[in-house]
């Protein structure tokens, strides 16, 4: 099977952040491979190990994001495509989906894998937008993938349970990080990644309208979520503190 | 008159409370702006839901009924939604945020060439569309966002709005729809570990959540007992859903579900930011953890420092007394 995994470089939610002049400021050296995309790469590699095929990764981002493409190659992906942006554009999910759609338009693919959401914005839109733009069948929030009768059997975490869906090729799947534990690149993997082919495509070479006026959503500001005040800590004899807190939940809080 | 349309999601024959929260909000907005609030049910059996929905004051209740909607499948749902959009041409289409609505939001927006906003915690109408707030950075940050054009399609986090009943003369209108299995494009082979009649976590008033500190059968029994005394939904951290100790649908947090109960009890959970992202809308948070420096204590209203195996039995005993 020929896989393309769409991967994104995102800020680490654990890194310190500041809001300044209406912008979110974070150290870009703490940027990482989106955790959901790491799981998508891992799953494609596992399928490749058992069934053969190809794993290609594609990333849209500025020059700096190349390190994330390298990381996926170091995990074991065969080739990388870097769709190069200037870095200051304010793209929303639809913009990314349009760029990816233009990239995939004349590609031969069995399955496109995306993350189920970006770890920083939690939007969760790009994957199904891309599927719609390409006219592909898709499933989201996959927690497991296997091959069955030349198709992908997707285990999807839905509202009513886990749906087992047989998805024909070409198709698109968005992946949860509940799927697997992505491998940490080995030293050998890192060395090999340096020799792997990476194609750079300037975004202007693609036929996608992502001009500043084109996007229908925009972020107008950020604020820190008000922190919850820590309450009281109860230390001491388990019997006593347990009793005390249970009673307070009843009498002081009226929540039981 | 222009319309604000609320999609009503039904699982196992029951209307999701979060859909009614969204319908309540849309009715309020419609009244403020001189617009019409309408609701849309797409289901294999719509009749059971109609009376309950009327209480929330929609002017029109659109229904699309077909056996294909017994289980969630995105192809027919998208088809039905675009038929409905064509007929109703709403300015806004709002969903409760569920796995099913998240599954189709992007595709529907692309299909309608519409702006979409996922998982908002507040929304308002503006002259040009919708403005909203949405949590990001694992809920550390709230972003203000604007979506322009018509329609704007959005999903709303559960617990964001209260239920408000309003009377209205509701007209029920069926939208004709047909779907051939040949157009499915994929095959749903089976649904495993259906959550059935268990408490829906995103709607539960009390949630007991287990983390890695709950390491064996004895611990899980204590969790069950605590939940049963409090009539609570059981949730878990990723550590335990990943280990297979709890069903993946019970995960609470950034990857899992967002909960907004009156009482949330975290047992043996460290309080990683991705877990906390799902629980900060709880009214009261109680944490039981043996590490006095565990980050969960920074957000807990009541922090019990101790071994859960020693704290839970007397805690459960006392709760039983209070309840009995
Ligand atoms: C993109 C992404 C998304 C994620 N999404 C989620 C999500 O949705 N939900 C989620 O939960 N996690 C999520 N995670 C994982 C998260 O970062 C943590 O790894 C996870 O929440 C840890 O679970 P835990 O608190 O149970 O385990 P640990 O962090 O190992 O904590 C166990 C705690 O139990 C305490 N303990 C141990 N023994 C006892 C005892 N006998 N009595 C009392 N206390 C005891 C310890 O002191 C410790 O604090 C996500 C991670 C990423 C990267
Ligand atoms: N800049 C990008 N480059 C490559 N893939 C992307 C990019 N942005 C989004 N994606 C894909 O879309 C998913 C996230 O979608 P969203 O949550 O809408 O941002 C990611 O997990 C990727 O698979």
Image (spheres, rainbow, N blue to C red):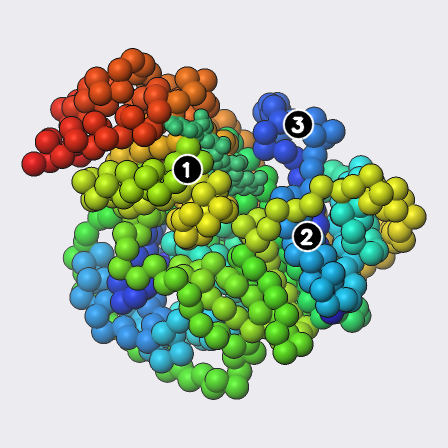
> Quarter of the image holding residue A1?
bottom right
Are discs 2 and 1 located on one and the same chain?
A: no
> Horizontal placement of B286 versus B188: left or right?
left
- Residue A208 horizontal/vertical position (percent): 75, 59
| Label 2, label 3: how far apart the Cα atoms are | 27 Å
Q: What residue is pinned by disc 2?
A: A42
Q: Nearer the viewer, mark 2 or mark 1?
A: 1
- Residue B222 horizontal/vertical position (percent): 28, 38
Q: Is residue A100 above or below residue B296?
A: below
Q: Local crowd at mark 3 within 10 Å, few (<14), some, or many (≥20)?
A: some
In this orientation, which residue lies closer to the viewer: B231 or A58? B231
Image marks 2 and 1: residues in contact by CB distance under 8 Å: no
Q: Is residue A198 above or below residue A25?
A: below
Q: What residue is pinned by disc 3?
A: A26
Q: Which mark is residue B215?
A: 1
Q: Nearer the viewer, mark 3 or mark 1?
A: 1
Q: Quadrant of the C terminus of chain A?
A: top left
Q: Kindly tell me whether mark 1's CB lies below 8 Å from ligand 1.
A: yes
Kindly state the secondary structure of the residue where label 1 is placed: loop
Kindly state the secondary structure of the residue where label 3 is placed: loop
- The residue under the point 50% across, 68% down is A164
Q: Which mark is residue B183?
A: none
In this orientation, which residue lies closer to the viewer: B20 or A159? A159
């Amino acid at each position: 099977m020929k896989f393309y995994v769409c991967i994104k470089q995102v800020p680490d939610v654990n890194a310190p952040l500041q809001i300044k002049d209406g912008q979110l400021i974070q150290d870009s050296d703490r940027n990482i491979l989106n955790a959901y995309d790491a799981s998508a790469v891992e799953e494609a590699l596992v399928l490749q190990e058992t069934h053969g095929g190809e794993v290609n990764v594609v990333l849209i981002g500025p020059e700096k994001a190349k390190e994330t493409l390298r990381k996926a190659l170091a995990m074991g992906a065969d080739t990388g495509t870097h769709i190069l942006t200037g870095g200051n554009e304010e793209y929303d999910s639809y913009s990314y989906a349009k760029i990816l759609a233009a990239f995939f338009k004349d590609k031969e693919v069995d399955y496109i894998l995306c993350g189920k959401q970006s770890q920083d914005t939690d939007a969760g839109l790009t994957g199904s937008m891309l599927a719609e733009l390409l006219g592909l069948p898709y499933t989201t929030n996959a927690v497991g993938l296997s091959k069955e009768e030349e198709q992908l059997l997707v285990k999807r975490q839905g509202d009513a349970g886990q749906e087992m869906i047989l998805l024909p090729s070409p198709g698109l799947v968005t992946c949860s990080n509940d799927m697997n534990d992505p491998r940490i690149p080995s030293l050998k993997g890192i060395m090999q990644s340096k020799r792997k082919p990476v194609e750079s495509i300037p975004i202007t070479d693609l036929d996608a309208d992502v001009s500043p006026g084109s996007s229908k959503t925009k972020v107008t500001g950020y604020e820190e979520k008000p922190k919850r005040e820590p309450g009281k800590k109860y230390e001491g004899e388990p019997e006593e503190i347990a009793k005390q807190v249970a009673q307070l939940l009843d009498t002081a809080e009226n929540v039981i | 008159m222009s319309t604000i349309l609320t999609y009503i999601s039904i699982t196992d024959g029951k209307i999701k409370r979060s859909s009614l929260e969204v319908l309540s909000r849309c009715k309020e907005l419609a009244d403020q702006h001189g617009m019409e609030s309408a609701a849309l049910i797409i289901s294999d059996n719509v009749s059971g839901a109609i009376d309950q929905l009327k209480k929330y004051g929609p002017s029109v209740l659109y229904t699309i009924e077909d056996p294909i909607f017994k289980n969630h499948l995105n192809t027919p749902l998208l088809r039905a939604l675009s038929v409905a959009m064509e007929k109703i041409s709403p300015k806004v289409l709002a969903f409760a945020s569920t796995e099913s609505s998240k599954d189709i939001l992007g595709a529907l927006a692309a299909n309608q060439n519409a702006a979409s906003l996922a998982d908002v915690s507040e929304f308002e109408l503006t002259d040009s569309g919708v403005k909203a707030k949405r949590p990001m950075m694992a809920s550390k940050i709230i972003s203000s966002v604007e979506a322009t054009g018509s329609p704007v399609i959005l999903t709303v986090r559960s617990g964001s709005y209260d239920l408000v009943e309003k009377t209205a003369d509701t007209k029920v209108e069926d939208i004709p729809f047909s779907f051939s299995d040949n157009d499915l494009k994929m095959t749903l082979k089976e649904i495993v570990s259906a959550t059935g009649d268990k408490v829906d976590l995103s709607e539960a008033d009390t949630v007991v959540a287990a983390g890695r500190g709950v390491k064996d059968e004895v611990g899980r029994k204590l969790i069950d007992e605590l939940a049963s005394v409090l009539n609570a939904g059981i949730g878990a951290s990723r550590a335990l859903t990943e280990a297979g100790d709890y069903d993946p649908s019970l995960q609470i947090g950034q990857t899992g579900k967002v909960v907004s109960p009156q009482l949330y009890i975290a047992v043996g959970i460290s309080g990683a930011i991705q877990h906390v992202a799902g629980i900060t809308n709880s009214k009261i948070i109680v944490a039981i953890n043996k590490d006095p420096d565990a980050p969960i204590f920074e957000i807990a209203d009541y922090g019990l420092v101790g071994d859960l195996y020693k704290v839970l039995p007397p805690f459960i005993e006392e709760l039983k007394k209070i309840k009995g």
